[in-house]
Image: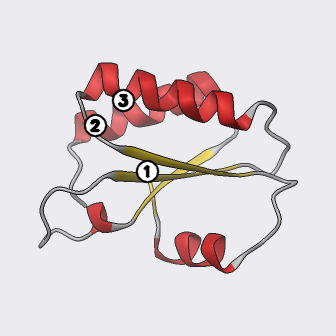
Amino acid sequence: MRLTTQQVNTIKTLVAEIFGADVRVHLFGSRLDDSKRGGDIDLLIQSNTVIDQQLHKASLLAARLQLKLGEQKFDIVVKDAQTADSSFYSEASRTATLL
């Protein structure tokens, strides 16, 4: 995984502040491959309950991550109790690593 301990802790802290303590945050995509360089930070946020204002919260998280971690691209995907299952969510969940 190509994230530092500080980056992981920052991500987990901000996710809990914005989405609540009951969500899980996973890293998926190219940042899991230590042999690659660069790439955006793909985050999958999952909850067994409904998350209100998903788009607003995801945008807020991306902005706050940029302020804390610097100019980077973040892709934030939210799956809550009302989100329909799809092959995308299944694949992201299958390959993701819990932070």
Q: Amino acid at mark 2?
A: Gln
- What percent of the width, then of the height, locates residue 23? 66, 42
Choose top left, top right, bottom left or bottom right for residue 94. Answer: bottom right
22 left or right of 16 in image: right
Structural distance between the alpha carbons of marks 3 and 1:
11 Å
70 left or right of 37 in image: right
Marks 2 and 3: CB-CB under 8 Å? yes
Return the residue at label 2: 7
Upstream in sequence: badge 2 or badge 1 = 2
SS category of the residue bearing label 2: helix
Res. 19 in view: no
Residue at image x 54%, y 24%? Answer: 60
Upstream in sequence: badge 3 or badge 1 = 3
Q: Is residue 8 above or below residue 80?
A: above
49 left or right of 66 in image: right
- What percent of the width, then of the height, locates residue 48? 80, 52
Structural distance between the alpha carbons of marks 2 and 1:
10 Å
Residue at image x 64%, y 70%? Answer: 89
Return the residue at label 3: 10
Return the residue at label 1: 99
Choose top left, top right, bottom left or bottom right for residue 83. Answer: bottom right
Residue at image x 58%, y 22%? Answer: 17
Res. 92 in view: yes
21 left or right of 51 in image: left
Q: Amino acid at mark 1?
A: Leu
Q: Is residue 42 above or below residue 69?
A: below
